[in-house]
Amino acid sequence: MRQKLGWIDISTSSIAEFANRNNLDAATLSSAEPVLILPSNATFNELPQEHLFASSAKEVLFVLRESNVAATIYQDNRERRELILKSDLVILPTLYYVAGAASSVALSVLANWIYDRFVKNNDSEDQPSIRYESADRMADGSVRWRRVEGPANEVCKLLRQESKALTDGMTHNSQRVQRQGGPQWHTNQKKALQKVSRKGKK
């Protein structure tokens, strides 16, 4: 029986340590919000001199922005190059999330993009294996770095489940805050998630 696909925890560390392991600038990560597309520098044993971005990075940036997610591509003074692999593994860009509603929307958008690009018109045997890494900046300032790798349809399903869980959690917290007389949950983010969820229903 095949093992259920799930997240693999790479590490939980400070921003400085995460930046060092990925050849990035800690100050840029500290000031970023809400979604930053990172290079895949840690794919190889030795960190490259330039930043290696997944071939899909610009396309992912476009679909995120099209769904009203404020996303940017990581930049510093280093040269940027496209990551080319001699294998069937599809490496997606690492998304760096600052704690907030944007991660649930971005995950839903990414799941829909994976479905349209790799699942919808392909038999299960023809679907590539996909690797996706998520770096979440937590409320305490640490970075939780995770990876999922598996068939496209299963990665898509996992990201949708994660998006829903995050949304349900935020809705629950919002209802609790409202009962206590606090501010309402961010309406624009909620509407954005509903919009991309409707687009993803096939």
Image: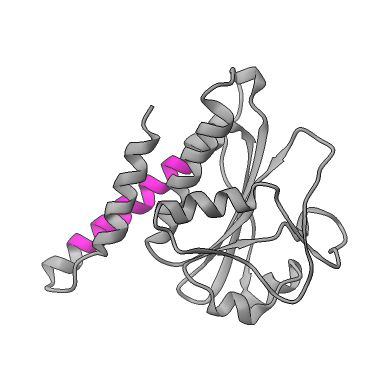
When asked about the image quadrant of residue 179, the answer is bottom left
**Magenta residues, dominant SS class:** helix
Q: Residue at x 37, y 44 (%)?
A: 196
Q: Is residue 8 visible?
A: no
The colour scheme applied to this rendered structure is: one colour
Instruction: Classify residue 88 as left or right of residue 146.
Output: right
Which residue shows up at 59% across the image and 32% down it? 152
**Within the image, what quadrant is residue 6 found in?**
top right
Evaluate whether residue 119 shows in this view.
Answer: yes
The residue that appears at 55% across and 21% down in the rendered structure is 121
Residue 53 lies left or right of residue 30; in this view the side is right
Q: Is residue 130 left or right of residue 157?
A: right
Which residue corresponds to the image point at 56% horizontal and 33% vertical from the top-left? 117
79, 51: nearer the viewer? 79
* Residue 37 x/y as whole percent: 60, 60
The question of residue 82 being in magenta is answered with: no
Residue extending furthest bottom? 27
- For the magenta stretch, what is the residue range? 159-175
Residue 156 location in percent, x, y? 51, 36
Q: Between residue 178 and residue 63, name the one nearer to us.
A: 63
Q: Position of residue 73 (x, y in %)?
A: 61, 64
Tell me the quadrant of the picture where the N terminus can be found.
top right
Q: Quadrant of the C terminus?
A: top left
Res. 170 image quadrant: bottom left
